[in-house]
C-alpha cells in the first residue's frame, strides 16, 4: 500500500521556520552586509541589487521570488507551497526589521571572525528552516524545474547558480572580501548539514558472526537496543547466514565492541554514520538504565 504523504500544516513547523528566517536575516544584516560579504542564491542577488541600486533586500527578496513562485507552484505540493510562501515573507519581514533595529556586533573589522560568525549563525537559521520543511523559494524552485525538464540534479544546479551569483558579486566587492565569502559559504553549508542531521550522529553497525544469536541477546538485554537480523549469503561459499544490524549512540560503540569480542573475536564489523533513525525499533532515543529507568516509567 502506498503511504500518503502528510500535507497538513503544523504550528510547530511555522514557528520554527519563522525562527530560522529571523536568524538568517539577522546574520545577513549584521554580518554579511555590515562586513561587505557576498552570498549565494537569491540572498546574493538581493545584495548585488542593494549595492548597485540601493534597493532594500527586504523588498527585492519578494520581488524576485514572486515570479519564481508563480512559475514553480505546480511543482510544489500544498504544504511545500505554503511553507515556501511563508518562509519568503518571514525572511523579508525580518530583513526589514533587523535593518531598522540598532544592533551592531563589533568584530574589530576582522573579516575571518565575520565570515565564521556569518557561516555559523546563518547556517543555523537555514538548517532550522530546512529541518522543518521550509524554504525561501528562489534557486530551490529553479533547481526543481531544471531537474524535471532537463534531468539535471538539484545539487548541481544549486552549485552552479551559487557560483554565478558569487562571480557577479565581484562588481561590488574585491577579491579579498570574496575570499572570506568563500570561507563563509563553506562554514554555512557545513552548519546546514549538521542542523539537518540533528545535534547527534548515531552509528549503525553491521555484524557478521556465527554467534549472531548470543551477540543479539546481549545487545538487547544489556543495552536495550532494537536489533534486526538480516538474511544474507556468503559471496564465496554461497552459504546462508545472518547479519546483525543495530543503531547506537557514539559513546555506546565501546560497549558493543566488548559484547562482540566476548562471543567472537573474529567477527566482521562495519560501522557507518547514521544521521537519522526512524521507525519502530529504530528510534534513536537514549535508553534509561537503573534509577533512570524507574523515573521514566
Image: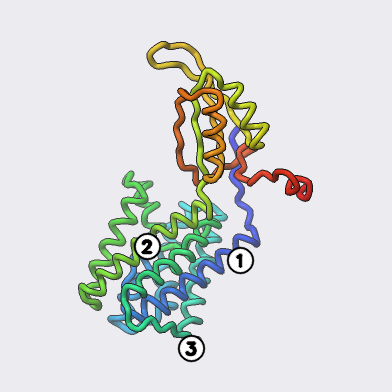
Which residue is pictured at 57% across the width and 31% down the height? 259
Q: Nearer the viewer, mark 1 or mark 3?
A: 3
Q: What residue sits right under mark 1 in the picture?
A: 15
Task: Please tell me whether mark 1 sits on a helix, a strand or a loop.
Answer: helix
- Callout 2 environment at 10 Å: few (<14), some (14 to 19), or many (20+)? many
Residue 69: percent from left, percent from top: 45, 62
Task: Please tell me whether mark 2 sits on a helix, a strand or a loop.
Answer: helix
User: What whole-number distance in Å separates the C-alpha atoms at marks 1 and 2?
Assistant: 25 Å
State whether residue 242 is above or below residue 132.
above
Residue 61: percent from left, percent from top: 42, 72
Which residue is pictured at 46% across the width and 74% down the height? 25
132 left or right of 28? right
- Callout 1 environment at 10 Å: few (<14), some (14 to 19), or many (20+)? few
Q: What residue sits right under mark 2 in the picture?
A: 187
Q: What residue sits right under mark 3 in the picture?
A: 102
Q: Nearer the viewer, mark 2 or mark 3?
A: 2
Q: How is the image coloured?
A: rainbow
Task: Please tell me whether mark 3 sits on a helix, a strand or a loop.
Answer: loop
- Callout 3 environment at 10 Å: few (<14), some (14 to 19), or many (20+)? few
Residue 243: percent from left, percent from top: 52, 24
Earlier along the polypeptide chain: callout 1 or callout 2?
1
Residues tagged 2 and 3 counted as in contact (Cβ below 8 A): no
Amino acid at each position: 500500500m502506498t503511504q500518503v504523504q502528510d500535507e497538513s500544516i503544523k504550528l510547530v513547523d511555522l514557528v520554527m521556520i519563522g525562527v530560522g528566517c529571523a536568524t538568517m536575516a539577522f546574520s545577513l544584516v549584521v554580518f554579511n552586509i555590515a562586513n561587505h560579504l557576498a552570498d549565494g542564491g537569491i540572498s546574493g542577488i538581493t545584495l548585488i541589487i542593494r549595492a548597485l541600486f540601493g534597493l532594500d533586500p527586504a523588498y527585492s527578496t519578494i520581488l524576485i521570488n514572486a515570479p519564481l513562485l508563480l512559475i514553480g507552484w505546480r511543482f510544489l505540493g500544498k504544504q511545500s507551497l505554503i511553507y515556501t510562501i511563508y518562509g519568503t515573507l518571514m525572511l523579508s519581514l525580518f530583513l526589514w526589521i533587523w535593518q531598522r533595529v540598532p544592533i551592531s556586533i563589533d568584530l574589530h573589522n576582522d573579516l575571518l571572525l565575520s565570515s565564521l560568525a556569518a557561516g555559523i549563525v546563518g547556517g543555523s537559521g537555514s538548517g532550522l528552516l530546512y529541518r522543518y520543511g521550509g524554504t525561501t523559494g528562489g534557486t530551490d524552485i529553479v533547481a526543481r524545474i531544471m531537474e524535471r525538464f532537463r534531468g539535471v540534479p538539484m545539487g548541481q544546479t544549486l552549485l552552479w547558480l551559487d557560483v554565478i551569483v558569487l562571480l557577479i558579486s565581484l562588481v561590488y566587492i574585491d577579491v579579498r572580501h570574496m575570499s572570506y565569502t568563500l570561507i563563509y559559504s563553506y562554514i554555512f553549508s557545513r552548519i546546514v548539514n549538521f542542523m539537518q542531521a540533528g545535534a547527534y550522529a548515531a552509528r549503525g553497525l553491521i555484524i557478521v558472526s556465527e554467534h549472531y544469536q548470543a551477540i543479539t541477546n546481549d545487545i538487547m538485554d544489556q543495552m536495550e537496543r532494537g536489533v534486526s537480523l538480516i538474511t544474507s549469503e556468503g559471496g564465496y561459499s554461497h552459504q546462508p547466514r545472518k547479519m546483525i544490524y543495530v543503531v547506537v549512540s557514539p559513546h555506546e560503540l565501546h560497549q558493543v565492541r566488548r559484547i562482540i569480542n566476548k562471543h567472537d573475536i573474529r567477527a566482521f564489523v562495519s560501522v557507518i554514520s547514521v544521521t537519522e533513525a526512524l521507525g519502530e525499533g529504530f528510534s534513536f532515543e537514549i535508553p534509561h538504565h537503573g534509577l533512570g529507568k524507574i523515573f521514566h516509567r
